[in-house]
Amino acid sequence: MQQLLLNIVPDCPATFNNFIPGENCESLTAVRDLAQHHKSDPLIYIWGAAASGKTHLLRAALLSAQNQHEQTLYFNAQENEGVIESGFDLLAIDNVEHLSPNQQIQLFSHINRAREGQGRIVCTGNAAPKYLPLRADLSSRLAWHLVYQLIPLSDVHKREALAQRSQTLGFILNPEHIEFLMRHWRRDLSALFTLIDRLDEYSRMEQRPITLPLLREVLSIHQA
């Protein structure tokens, strides 16, 4: 049954409006201000655990800058072994802990140019700057600017995020459905969002409303 699922899930672009901040209001405001030219500091470094919302903030910043007709670049160091290109207004680098030695030199140069007024940069990583496996001068550069740790969402805020995600997809998850998912599925938000997307997909394919029996079917498929 699982292989019959179709990729018909509507796009849910990451925006500042659909980011659930929880205890991260200051981080959200800082990244939004940078993206919209309200910050004088040209660099923000965000760190935190997996699925804490780092990539969401990066992509929201890029979308905001693109809406201002700016040149943007998203670079995931965990997946990209190439060159970090120049010529951007906003550069977003994900997973800086995976930067190669050459990429670290390139980022260091980009930061220096940003400090001279040539572009803005948002970076993410899995640890505070001093604990990153990077060149000492690059870690120092990251630490000199704005640094924010993302705090994982509480269960209350995860429930809010699940309700918002379902509304974005065009259906309503009632509290009973959300509680069922929270009890019977992994608690990290990325896994929960993936399941919500698959639930919507399966509901459309089967032409059935979202019910607890349907939830159990989708869970059984993904747990198989």
Image: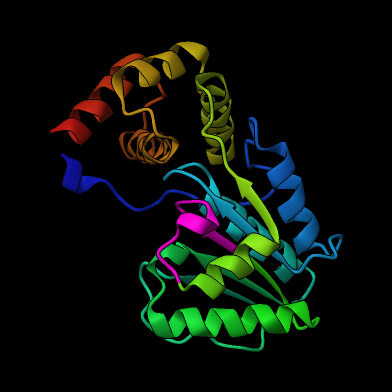
Within the image, what quadrant is residue 33 found in? Answer: bottom right
Q: Residue at x 66, y 70 (%)?
A: 121
Instruction: Where is residue 60? Give x, y as percent.
Output: 64, 56
Q: Can residue 117 be spotted in the picture? A: yes
Residue at 75%, 51% in the rendered image: 30
Inspect the magenta stretch and tell me whether residue 9 lies in it: no
Q: Position of residue 134 (x, y in %)?
A: 44, 69
Q: Pick whichever, 23 or 20, lies toward us.
A: 23
**In the displayed structure, does residue 142 sit left or right of residue 3?**
right
Pick the quarter of the image with the C terminus: top left
The boundaries of the magenta stretch are: 123-134
Q: Image point 17% across, 48% down: which residue?
A: 3
Asked which quadrant contains residue 72, the reply is bottom right
Q: 67 or 115, which lies in front?
A: 115
Q: Nearer the viewer, residue 156 or 192?
A: 156
Q: Quadrant of the N terminus?
A: top left
Report the residue that reaches farthest toward the top. Answer: 176
